[in-house]
Amino acid sequence: GGQLVESGGGSVQTGGSLRLSCILSGSTFDDIDMGWYRQAPGNECELVSSIYVDGTTWYADSVKGRFTISRDNGKTSLYLQLNSLKPPDTAVYHCAGEILGRRAECATIRGYSTYWGQGIQVTVSS
């Protein structure tokens, strides 16, 4: 099986930008819908954005117009550009292979997903 590894997180001030990357090693994901979930302290996993095999994208209302998802199947890489960041965006972000709903316990999503990244911290200060 493959393994997803995220990078690109960090700490920024309100209004700042980050670019998250997620690389799948040991497999391919051309035929898998991919997405980014995030978990704020004490909360369930929330689907932030998804990109399907046909290239269709979806965004949560809270990030629409600020975040952009993309994928490069040749590089088995998934990306999330985060612009105009706000303190409520603070969370651990996970990339996932297969999408299970828009909000659920992270452990449930992890069990359903074909691939699940370990998560990367994004912190936005005011």
Image (tube, rainbow, N blue to C red):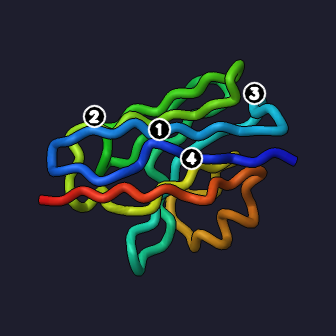
Q: CA distance from mark 2 to mark 3?
A: 26 Å
Read off the residue under disc 1: 58
- The quarter of the picture where residue 121 lies is bottom left
Q: In the visual, does 27 lie left or right of 11?
A: right
Q: Choose mark 1 or mark 3, whichever is in front.
A: 3
Note whether 114 is above or below 53 in the view shown. below
Read off the residue under disc 2: 65
Q: Are marks 1 and 3 in contact (CB under 8 Å)?
A: no
Residue that protrudes farthest toward the left in the picture: 126
Crowding around mark 2 (Cα neighbors within 10 Å: few <14, some 14 to 19, many 20+) is few
Residue at 59% x, 69% y is 106
Q: Are marks 2 and 4 in contact (CB under 8 Å)?
A: no
Q: Amino acid at mark 3?
A: Asp
Read off the residue under disc 4: 6
SS at badge 2: loop
Q: Nearer the viewer, residue 7 or 93?
A: 7
Q: Amino acid at mark 2?
A: Gly
Q: In the visual, does 16 lie left or right of 74?
A: left
Q: CA distance from mark 4 to mark 1?
A: 20 Å
Q: Earlier in the sequence, mark 2 or mark 3?
A: 3
Read off the residue under disc 3: 30
Residue at 44% x, 42% y is 8
Q: Earlier in the sequence, mark 4 or mark 1?
A: 4
Q: In the visual, does 41 lie left or right of 33?
A: left
- The quarter of the picture where residue 77 lies is top right
Q: Position of residue 97 (x, y in %)?
A: 69, 46
Q: Position of residue 11 (x, y in %)?
A: 29, 54
